[in-house]
Image (tube, rainbow, N blue to C red):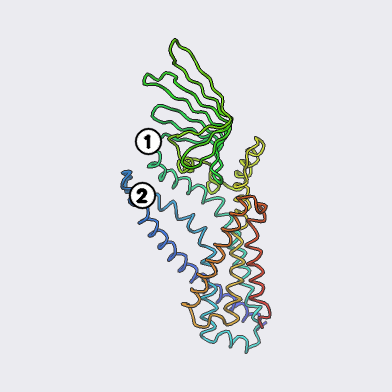
Amino acid sequence: MRLDKQMTIIHAYITRMFFKYFAMVLGMVIVIYLAIDFFGRIDNFIESSTSASQIIAYFLYKIPLIMSQITPVAVLMSFLAVFGLMAKNNEIIALKSGGVSLYYLLLPVMIIGMCLSLLLFVFSEAVVPISIVKANQIRAKKKHAKKMMTSRGENIWIRGDQSITHIQYYNPSDQTIFGISIVYFDDNFGLKKRIDAKKGKFSSGKWVLNDCMIQDFGLPDNEQATNFYDKKSFQLDLLPSDLQQVAVKSEEMSFSRLLKYIRKMESQGYDATKYRVELYAKTAFPFICLILSLFGSGLSLRGSTKEGMTISFAYGIVTAFIYWSFYSFCLSLGYGNILPPVVAAWIANLIFFCAAGLAIYNLE
């Protein structure tokens, strides 16, 4: 009974210390992230005459996304700090001398890691999509100052000075557009020209349209000319970066909404590989909290971070950088159809889970 009470006290101590450092790391990284983002965007906001209240609102709306991205890093660094300081203060040695198994110390680690993984998934589903939509709306005002651009699901409408463009679907992974219709007007808003094409791809500063039909109106004697082309290049007043602002973004949608969107696009014959990769990534990324908590704890308990918080933070930064680089690389392989979407999203977690297992293997 006494031993069980001691174990409860030890677990409560680890949990209390973890959340202390977790709050510290999370707050510190959010401030640094916002400061860097602020100085990187302030010139654009000033040029677009964005009000101070909108600028403040933009960065406040960015906080949920920042939290969702850096929570796994904060979890890793917090456990490294907790067990690193315990090792430095010889508390680990004292516990082992008292007959406490190091594996038993991993119980709160697993519980905290799993709980934070589930909470991160729920938070990313319920809060992040709403906040990122509002942030993107503020940021897009400058981008859309000269072009009126709207999007309803897969349909994108663009109003230029004397033209209206409709695009059924934009694939950001390869900068390809589908179902293009462009209508040009004269000074009296009379129909002047119309371009229709099944597919277009941005290449060398121009749009190359396939299966293209061009109709010229307003010719002498009210004649009309229609020409067909298998492939034709156009210098349109439209860039992929413009389309990126209004194209459907996976971070703006919940898992169920994104799945519904993917099924709709695939039923219409469009390539939704990029969105399917990001769909599986929505389930894979939160669970890195559990994996990194075990990995960090294993390193610390093996005595790899006895030097204290400074070395612990260095281990955390390097580990997070390696994971994020490898995770992004795997996603890019999924975007390029080199890896199946589910494999591209989960393989980084699988490899780091094995690394965590090695870190705690033969811990005693």
Q: Is residue 184 above or below residue 321?
A: above
Q: Is residue 357 above or below residue 150?
A: below
User: Residue 283 falls in which quadrant of the image?
Assistant: bottom right
Residue where numbered disc 2 is placed: 55
- Residue at image coords 53%, 43%: 175
Q: Position of residue 202 (x, y in %)?
A: 51, 40
Rendered location of residue 62, percent (x, y): 44, 53
Q: Position of residue 160 (x, y in %)?
A: 41, 31
Question: Relative to 299, does residue 205 appear above or below in the rendering?
Answer: above
Q: Which amino acid, mark 1?
A: Lys
Image position of 288 (left or right of 189):
right
Query: Which residue is denoted by mark 1 in the rendering?
Result: 146
In which image quadrant can residue 123 be found? bottom right
Q: Closer to the observer: label 2 or label 1? A: 1
**For the point 47% across and 38% down, which residue is it?**
206
Say if 22 sits above or below 262 in the image. Answer: below
How far, Cα to Cα, is label 2 from label 1? 20 Å
Q: Secondary structure at mark 1?
A: loop
Q: Is 346 or 26 nearer to us in this picture?
A: 346
Q: Residues within 10 Å of mark 1 (few under 14, many from 20)?
A: few
If the image is split into quadrants, where does the C terminus sit?
Answer: bottom right
Q: Secondary structure at mark 2?
A: helix
Lower position in the chain sequence, tag 2 or tag 1: 2
Q: Which mark is residue 199?
A: none
